[in-house]
Image: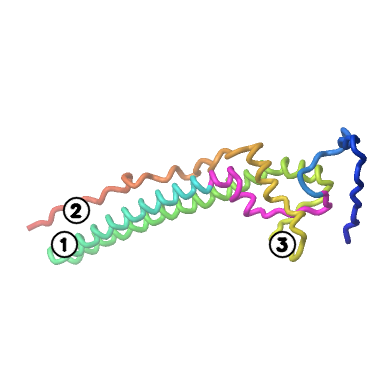
Amino acid sequence: MSATAVPVIAQPAGVQSIPPSLGQAVTDGPISPILTIDQDRLFQGSLYGKQVAEELEALSNHLAVENRGIEAQLTQEERALTALRPSLTPQEFTARADAFDARVEDIRRRQDAKGRDLARRHDLARAAFIQSVLPVLSAMMRERGAVAILNAQAIFLSFGTIDITDAAIERLDERIGAGPGLPLPESGEVAPPDDTPDPAPTPPVSP
């Protein structure tokens, strides 16, 4: 559908512009029945999304430090167990090795669960963000006389003037700011690095 050009009419000197009627919304962008928005940039560029990203990065780094500490600790324990092997009977060594392997698997499961919990919290934060922006986007649709907002990433070709991402980010930052951040974890907070499990004590070797 081609746009109809509207001629600009010069006003005589001293004539004031007629303000919009009470029923007409004042917009900060072009009026179009179809608008587009970049959902990823909307989230990442808003104060809300930046706050979530900052919290997620801090917790992810925290977890990475914790994992490295656990890995170093388990490596040390494995070497200690290997060094004891000549002084142990095959049955004793097998029992200790099996217990060590079971402990390693348990720690791996717990650390993997923490990583999945961070990803789930990010998804929940993004879903909450979408719910928070719907009223703002609905108002912007009405102001521009639009009937739909499409995801810009799904559009093959369009005029850039119908993209409202920047305007929406500005409006969201004014209305909701940084938001609540990441939701509380479901499986407990990520343990700090110094909370890694203590190494299992090595029983004394019988002479």
12 or 188, which is in the foreground? Answer: 12
Please tell me whether mark 1 sits on a helix, a strand or a loop: helix
Residue 32 is inside the magenta segment: yes
The image position of residue 165, as x and y in percent, is 69, 51
Look at discs 2 and 3 and give the one toward the viewer. 3
Q: Which residue is mark 3?
A: 154
Q: Amino acid at mark 2?
A: Thr
Q: Does label 1 or label 3 sit earlier along the sequence?
A: 1
How many numbered marks, from 0 up? 3
Judged from this view, the residue extending furthest toward the left is 207
Looking at the rendering, the stretch of residues picked out in magenta corresponds to 31-52
Real-space Cα separation, disc 2 to disc 1, in angstroms: 10 Å
Question: Pointer 1 and pointer 3: residues touching (CB < 8 Å)?
Answer: no
Q: Is residue 68 left or right of residue 47?
A: left
Real-space Cα separation, disc 1 to disc 3, in angstroms: 62 Å
**Quadrant where the N terminus lies?**
bottom right
Question: Pointer 2 and pointer 1: residues touching (CB < 8 Å)?
Answer: yes
Please tell me whether mark 2 sits on a helix, a strand or a loop: loop
Q: What residue do we see at 50% from left, 44% from top? A: 186
Q: How is the image coloured?
A: rainbow
107 or 70, which is in the foreground? Answer: 70
Look at discs 1 and 3 and give the one toward the viewer. 3
State the image quarter where residue 89 is shown: bottom left
